[in-house]
Amino acid sequence: MIDQIRRSSRSVCANIAEGYRKRRCPAHFISKLSDADTENTETQVWIEFSFACGYISENTKSEWDQETIEIGKLIGYRTANPEKFGVHKL
């Protein structure tokens, strides 16, 4: 499960980077941010499973949960304010 956490969390970064690279197309930028948010949610699920199976401590779970929540907020802000990240609406 830890490997799944690594994969999904890395995918968050990759999707944000891909979206930023294609920021001239607002729809593509928002779509990639949506993908990043989905991967962040998947990471949260794997954290829950890892804790339930006893692979991580409650402290680790709490710390990682807070990080995924903060990442979700940042993704949400970018999605709501694409023009602040170089996206120009046509």
Image (cartoon, rainbow, N blue to C red):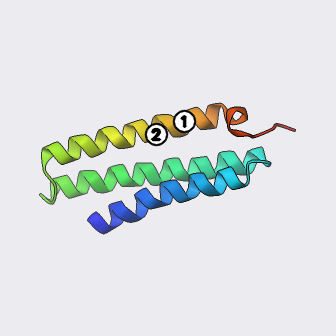
Question: Callout 2: few (<14), some (14-19), or many (20+) C-alpha neighbours within 10 Å?
Answer: some
Q: Quadrant of the N terminus?
A: bottom left
Quarter of the image for residue 30 reads top right
Query: Could you say where residue 43 lies in the image, as x and y percent from the top left?
Result: 37, 54
Element on which disc 2 rests: helix
Residue 1 appears in the figure: no
- Residue located at (69% from left, 48% from top): 29
Residues under numbered marks 2 and 1 in contact, where contact means CB atoms less than 8 Å apart = yes
- Residue located at (25% from left, 51% from top): 48
**Residue beneath label 2, please?**
72
Query: Could you say where residue 42 lies in the image, as x and y percent from the top left?
Result: 40, 54
- Residue located at (74% from left, 40% from top): 86
Is residue 68 positioned above or below 45 on the image? above
Is residue 86 positioned above or below 36 on the image? above
Is residue 32 positioned above or below 79 on the image? below
Q: Is residue 9 left or right of residue 83?
A: left
Query: Could you say where residue 6 lies in the image, as x and y percent from the top left?
Result: 36, 63
- Residue located at (13% from left, 50% from top): 57
Quarter of the image for residue 78 reads top right
Q: Which amino acid is tagged 2?
A: Gly
| Mark number, residue 76 | 1
Element on which disc 1 rests: helix
In the displayed image of the protein, which residue is found farthest to the bottom? 3
Q: Is residue 87 left or right of residue 55?
A: right
